[in-house]
Amino acid sequence: MPIFLWGVLPYVVALTLVAGTIWRYRYDQFGWTTRSSQLYESRLLRIASPMFHYGLFVVLMGHLMGLLIPKAWTDLVVSQETYHLVALGFGTLAGIATLLGIGLLIYRRRTTGPVFLATTRNDKLMYVVLVSAIVFGMIATLTGSHTPSGAEHNYRETVSVWFRSLIVFQPDVNAMAASTWQFQVHILVGLALFALVPFSRLVHAFTVPLHYLFRPYIVYRSRDPLPPTPSRGRVRGWDPVGTPDRDKGHR
Ligand code: HEM
């Protein structure tokens, strides 16, 4: 069983994520959307959506650091106690913001009529898995540092070692099996979420319009006054194709 859960399943999920995303991109261009509900309600959305997305961004950055940077490297710079305290502080704050944000988003979805009507079964399944991933992540962070028998457990010596072993295709099944149940459940739910991504609204994460941050401003200005046409006087709107002289000196 451990071989399947920690040595086979992660690759099945990675393959599903990549192949499923390519398939969705090729066959469902019109469905590649957040299915935004901003038109129906924006007061709550304006608070809840950034709270969830920025919170999750910090959480995921923390994951990259905690999972990819070996403990031996950070030991050279900071003590394990300091590292743990800082990670716990930021992780818990970001986790609470993410959880509050998604809680508000789901409350809004349930209580705003048109938003609820626009919610599919696919969305509901996605919300259950997403919320479970976050909740079990919090449980792991807050209670997973000791095994049931009271022994110390440091996820950077189990989960992180396993995670990096996956990247080099030499899965260290035993490292993950030695972790606590809180982390094991959290990661299984996380894997379920990754498998759902290509088949849900979550695909929008791959096409965040980051170029909006860097594109030039759009300058809106009123049109230059048009010179009067001798026969018709000044006409608003587009000129018929081939109208002589109207464009001269303009644009
Ligand atoms: C298979 C992939 C994943 C792995 C290996 C993983 C691993 C971890 C680890 C090791 C922690 C503890 C961090 C700490 O205590 O400092 C954690 C916490 C957490 N995880 Fe994950 N996780 C995964 C996927 C996810 C996903 C998909 C989400 C949410 C969508 C998520 C949300 C959280 C949250 C909210 C916390 C608690 C706050 C925090 O410590 O940042 N995780 N996860």
Image (cartoon, rainbow, N blue to C red):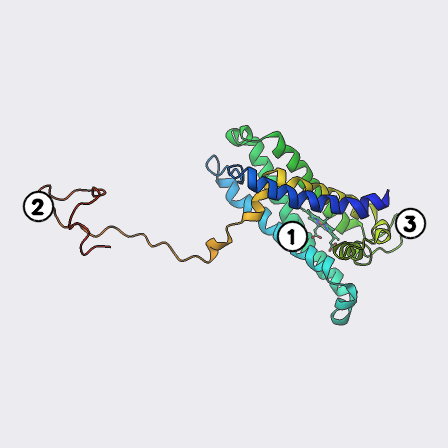
Residue 211, image x and y in percent? 48, 54
233 relative position to 212: left or right = left
Residue type indicated by callout 1: Ala
Does the residue at mark 2 contact the one at mark 3 (Cβ under 8 Å)? no
- Picture residue at 75% right of the left edge, 51% below the top: 141
Other residues around mark 2 within 10 Å, as few (<14) / some (14–19) / many (≥20): few
Towards the viewer: 39 or 205: 205
Residue 24, image x and y in percent? 59, 40
Which quadrant, please, contains the C terminus?
A: bottom left
Rendered image: mark on residue 248: none
Comes first in the chain, label 3 or label 1: 1
Other residues around mark 3 within 10 Å, as few (<14) / some (14–19) / many (≥20): few
SS label for mark 2: loop
Distance, label 1 to label 2, CA atoms, is 67 Å
SS label for mark 3: loop
83 relative position to 101: left or right = right
Which quadrant, please, contains the N terminus?
A: top right
Other residues around mark 1 within 10 Å, as few (<14) / some (14–19) / many (≥20): many
Disc 3: which residue: 149
- Picture residue at 74% right of the left edge, 43% below the top: 12
- Picture residue at 69% right of the left edge, 57% below the top: 64
Distance, label 3 to label 1, CA atoms, is 29 Å
Rendered image: mark on residue 230: 2
Q: Quadrant of residue 202?
A: top right
Disc 1: which residue: 94
Instruction: Look at the image and tell me whether residue 51 can be seen.
Output: no
Towards the viewer: 241 or 146: 241
Nearer mark to the viewer, of 2 and 3: 2
Towards the viewer: 132 or 202: 202
Nearer mark to the viewer, of 1 and 2: 2
- Mark 3: is the Cβ under 8 angstroms from ligand 1? no
